[in-house]
């Protein structure tokens, strides 16, 4: 296969803003006011606008000969001759639209191309080596927090590794409640095996709509697993691995129900690949071969059978000895990963926090206090001084951060690309759930208020006050008058408002009753 990747030059700037809307992009500089003529970076609806433009522009070619993600365009084909034809059509479309490419970021007719952190070729998909450097360079874990950070980092690439849960099981067991941290030969082997597996350039096959597709599923007493497989050129290629642990209620299911749950979960997991296409489910539970033909299904199986009706599939039985791929995943499941709150520990992963705490003389008093038998606020956990979190949110025990590391914490939770330069309230809320040090709120407020990036980019929430201009003094009575409208009073026989005229040079004033407060009535009184 051949691939071409193209990148637009400052893509947002190639979209012109309507002249009537340009005033909405005004920004202030020492030299005066400026407004954008083109769509700027950072506008909330800019990505959606740009993607809508690209989808509309390439609507006749997308998915059949090219793909686009914002300003990144990928053209693909099986032969070089077809590639030239497709490339010419896409380039012609871009030229007619007046879009310009960044030649330094374009790659044409290559057999391997980098797409969104992955390398794609005719052989399949593999992770970008630069992305797994963090795994290769990860230091030896010193405590439970380091274990959790390492497993969270490795889990990002788990779909590339067969038997990932089996390799990670010794480390996963350390995360269970009540288990003390122990770094022995078994844990060292698991740690090194994961690093080796993730840095050995694993490759997954690319999904082919024309090839026959199979989903291998299996369930155990504590997990379910699935493997998406295709037969391409008489060779079985793995497209993706998946597994998860069972909940407390699911562990009480019967064997048939757990095996059926694995099928339902796998079809939802791989839905983008299989929806609307015929596929085969391979299982080692023979009873499921008649799942769709049960005469009187009831309860949970009936609901699942109804849910599976939207798919076109056959069920194929394979003995457990020949069903090792999904079986290994179900018996060594990985818990579904979300954006874990422990990723903040990457800030302190590379440093021995206990040693860093010893460098801060101000923490000596807290350490003495923690040794007191009456103390319930501070405690040593894994050699790290921690303070009890009395707030219902966050962790129960918060590590105390020494003075020389607090700036790093503030930078990580405010300046980092994923932090978003939030205000002091949200920044403080994120930090207080994870760390503790005396005077944290004051430090956060001072840091955010002095952030140059925030001062430069964040607009003032209220409009600037108008310029105060002094009123010239009057030179004679009623040379200048001040007008004040009072009301609304209870309606009288002649109206319900009064206009009061005040002279600016003396105390003489006149008033007149009005029926309403329109400007025309006010001007009639003045004349």
Image (tube, rainbow, N blue to C red):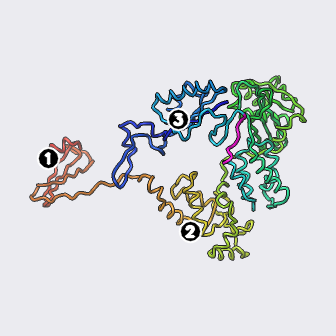
Part of the protein shown in magenta? 123-130
**Is residue 414 shown left or right of residue 523?**
right
Which residue in the structure is indicated by mark 2?
439
Label 1 neighbour load within 10 Å: few <14, some 14-19, many 20+: few
Q: Secondary structure at mark 2?
A: loop
**Is residue 462 shown left or right of residue 425?**
left
At x 14%, y 47%, the residue is 526
Q: Closer to the camera: disc 2 or disc 1? A: 2
Q: Which is more toward the observer, 493 or 343?
A: 343
Q: Which is more toward the observer, 450 or 127?
A: 127
Q: How many marks?
A: 3
Q: Closer to the camera: disc 1 or disc 3? A: 3
Q: CA distance from mark 1 to mark 3?
A: 59 Å
Query: Vertically, is 42 above or below 424?
Result: above
Residue 124 shows which numbered tag? none
Which residue in the structure is indicated by mark 1?
526
Label 2 neighbour load within 10 Å: few <14, some 14-19, many 20+: few
Q: Quadrant of residue 257?
A: top right
Of callouts 1 and 3, which one flags the residue occurring earlier in the amino acid sequence?
3
Query: Vertically, is 361 above or below 351?
Result: below
**Is residue 83 shown left or right of residue 445?**
right
At x 79%, y 55%, the residue is 176
Q: Closer to the camera: disc 2 or disc 3? A: 3
Q: CA distance from mark 2 to mark 3?
A: 45 Å
Of callouts 2 and 1, which one flags the residue occurring earlier in the amino acid sequence?
2
Of callouts 2 and 3, which one flags the residue occurring earlier in the amino acid sequence?
3
Can the viewer see residue 484 in this picture? yes
Which residue in the structure is indicated by mark 3?
51
Return the x and y of residue 510 as percentages of the image width and height.
14, 53
């Amino acid at each position: 296969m051949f691939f071409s990747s193209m990148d637009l030059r400052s893509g947002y700037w190639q979209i012109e803003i309507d002249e009537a809307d340009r005033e909405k992009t005004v920004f202030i500089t020492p030299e005066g006011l400026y407004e954008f003529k083109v769509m700027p970076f950072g506008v909330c609806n800019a990505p959606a606008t740009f993607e809508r433009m690209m989808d509309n522009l390439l609507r006749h070619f997308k998915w059949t000969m090219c793909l686009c993600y914002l300003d990144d365009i990928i053209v693909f084909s099986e032969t070089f001759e077809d590639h030239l034809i497709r490339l010419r059509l896409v380039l012609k479309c871009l030229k007619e639209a007046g879009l310009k490419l960044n030649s330094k970021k374009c790659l044409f007719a290559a057999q391997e191309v980098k797409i969104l952190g992955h390398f794609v070729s005719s052989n399949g998909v593999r992770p970008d080596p630069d992305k797994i450097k963090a795994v290769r360079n990860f230091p030896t874990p010193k405590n439970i927090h380091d274990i959790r950070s390492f497993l969270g980092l490795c889990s990002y690439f788990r779909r590339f590794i067969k038997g990932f849960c089996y390799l990670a099981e010794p480390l996963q067991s350390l995360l269970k409640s009540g288990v003390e941290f122990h770094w022995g030969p078994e844990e060292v082997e698991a740690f090194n095996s994961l690093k080796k597996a993730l840095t050995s350039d694993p490759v997954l096959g690319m999904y082919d709509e024309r090839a026959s597709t199979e989903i291998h599923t299996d369930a155990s007493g504590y997990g379910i697993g699935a493997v998406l497989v295709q037969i391409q050129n008489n060779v079985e290629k793995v497209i993706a691995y998946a597994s998860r642990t069972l909940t407390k209620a699911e562990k009480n299911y019967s064997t048939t129900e757990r095996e059926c749950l694995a099928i339902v979960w796998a079809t939802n997991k791989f839905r983008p690949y299989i929806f609307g296409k015929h596929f085969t489910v391979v299982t080692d539970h023979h009873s499921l071969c008649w799942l769709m033909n049960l005469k009187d299904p009831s309860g949970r199986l009936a609901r699942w059978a109804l849910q599976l009706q939207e798919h076109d599939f056959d069920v194929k039985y394979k003995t457990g000895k020949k069903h090792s791929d999904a079986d290994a995943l179900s018996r060594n499941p990985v818990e579904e990963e979300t954006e874990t709150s422990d990723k903040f520990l990457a800030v302190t992963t590379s440093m021995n926090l206990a040693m860093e705490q010893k460098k801060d003389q101000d923490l000596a008093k807290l350490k003495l206090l923690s040794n007191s038998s009456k103390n319930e606020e501070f405690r040593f956990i894994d050699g790290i001084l921690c303070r009890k979190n009395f707030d219902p949110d966050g962790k129960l025990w918060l590590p105390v951060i020494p003075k020389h590391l607090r700036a790093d914490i503030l930078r990580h939770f405010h300046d980092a690309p994923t932090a978003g330069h939030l205000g002091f309230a949200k920044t403080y809320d994120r930090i207080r759930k994870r760390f503790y040090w005396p005077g944290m709120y004051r430090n956060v407020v001072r840091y955010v208020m002095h952030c140059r990036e925030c001062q430069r980019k964040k607009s003032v929430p209220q409009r600037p006050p108008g310029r105060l201009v002094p009123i010239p003094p009057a030179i004679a009575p009623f040379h200048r008058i001040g007008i004040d409208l009072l009301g609304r009073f209870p309606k009288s026989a002649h109206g319900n408002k009064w206009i009061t005229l005040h002279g600016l040079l003396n105390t003489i004033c006149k008033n007149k009753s009005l029926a309403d407060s329109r400007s025309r009535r006010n001007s009639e009184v003045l004349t």
